[in-house]
Image: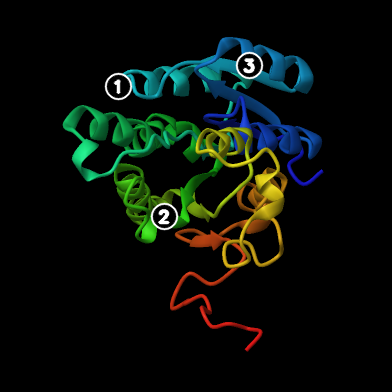
């Protein structure tokens, strides 16, 4: 019971990595507030988790007023808050010519503005519990793909947010850390690649340079890693930004030579 009696809010947690974290956190003794736009998915997961161990708040973080509303509702659910996981993110693709002001603003609103405003709104509760924030970033924050320019920029900004707030909130005993997650096999990622024209068994045929182990990351691996960072075991560490991937990101050049030669 590594998270016994902790109360944790996870944004964007009705599917994928967020849902996996919610299940594992409850199994480790936490009470969780799950969050998302889809009420049906939220209610289904709530029933699975148990209404005595979980609550669901519906809403869209693109709405400027929603972070404050979510913060108020989350604290009201169980009367306190020990940790915030900023997991919600939009991953909509667009290269530079297709990234207009409206598109860019929506990506940044959800991926960067909302985490900042949530931390701001929850700061009194986090100070009271001497709690922590775990921001879910991406390895694309370091550069990214040409068709994910807005997403990559938003995750780069999240790294600066993490470091800045960890410094300023340290005297309040509020910790802020970030996991930059690599390629992960969520339901959404699976169906995205199917839409790209890959075969149904594409996860079994990932090239070795992208997955040296033979398979890309699973949501359960990410959720397991998150337990340490939202638990008292990681106290007093703050300001850490680190990668979860199968290979080094810095200086790596995949071997293009013919290994049979």
Rendered image quadrant of residue 68: top left
Q: What residue does disc 3 label?
A: 41
Residue at position x 38%, y 19% in the image = 66
Distance of label 1 from label 2 (alpha carbons): 25 Å
Q: Position of residue 243 (x, y in %)?
A: 53, 61
Find residue 140 and name its label: 2
Question: Considering the image in quadrants, where does the N terminus appear?
Answer: top right
Q: Is residue 174 in view?
A: no
Does 174 appear above or below 114?
A: below
Question: Nearer the viewer's eye, disc 3 or disc 1?
Answer: 3
Whether tag 2 and tag 3 are in contact, CB under 8 A, the answer is: no
* Label 1 or label 2, whichever comes before in sequence order: 1
Q: Secondary structure at mark 1?
A: loop
Name the one closer to the observer, 221 or 200.
Answer: 200
Rendered image quadrant of residue 16: top right
Q: Position of residue 178 (x, y in %)?
A: 49, 53
Q: Secondary structure at mark 3?
A: helix
* Label 3 or label 1, whichever comes before in sequence order: 3
Distance of label 2 from label 3 (alpha carbons): 28 Å
Whether tag 3 and tag 1 are in contact, CB under 8 A, the answer is: no
Find residue 145 and name its label: none
Distance of label 3 from label 1 (alpha carbons): 23 Å
Name the one closer to the observer, 198 or 118.
Answer: 198
Question: Nearer the viewer's eye, disc 1 or disc 2?
Answer: 2
Q: What residue does disc 1 label?
A: 64
* Label 2 or label 3, whichever comes before in sequence order: 3
């Amino acid at each position: 019971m590594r998270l016994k009696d902790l109360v944790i809010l996870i944004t964007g947690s009705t599917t994928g990595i967020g849902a996996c974290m919610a299940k594992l956190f409850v199994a480790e003794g936490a009470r969780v507030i799950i969050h998302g736009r889809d009420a049906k998915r939220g209610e289904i997961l709530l029933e699975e988790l148990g209404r005595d161990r979980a609550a669901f708040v519906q809403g869209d973080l693109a709405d400027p007023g929603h972070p404050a509303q979510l913060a108020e509702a989350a604290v009201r659910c169980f009367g306190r808050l020990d940790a915030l996981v900023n997991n919600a993110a939009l991953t909509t693709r667009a290269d530079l010519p297709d990234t207009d002001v409206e598109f860019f603003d929506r990506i940044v609103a959800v991926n960067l503005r909302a985490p900042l405003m949530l931390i701001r709104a929850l700061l009194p509760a986090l100070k009271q519990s001497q709690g922590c924030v775990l921001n879910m970033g991406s390895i694309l924050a370091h550069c990214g793909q040409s068709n994910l320019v807005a997403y990559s920029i938003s995750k780069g900004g999240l790294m600066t947010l993490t470091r800045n707030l960890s410094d300023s909130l340290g005297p309040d005993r509020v910790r802020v850390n970030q996991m930059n997650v690599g390629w992960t096999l969520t339901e959404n990622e699976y169906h995205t690649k199917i839409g790209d024209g890959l075969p149904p068994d594409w996860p079994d045929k990932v090239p070795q340079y992208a997955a040296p182990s033979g398979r890309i990351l699973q949501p359960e691996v990410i959720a397991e890693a998150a337990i340490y960072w939202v638990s008292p075991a990681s106290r007093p560490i703050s300001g850490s930004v680190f990668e979860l991937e199968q290979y080094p990101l810095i200086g790596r050049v995949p071997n293009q030579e013919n290994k049979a030669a």
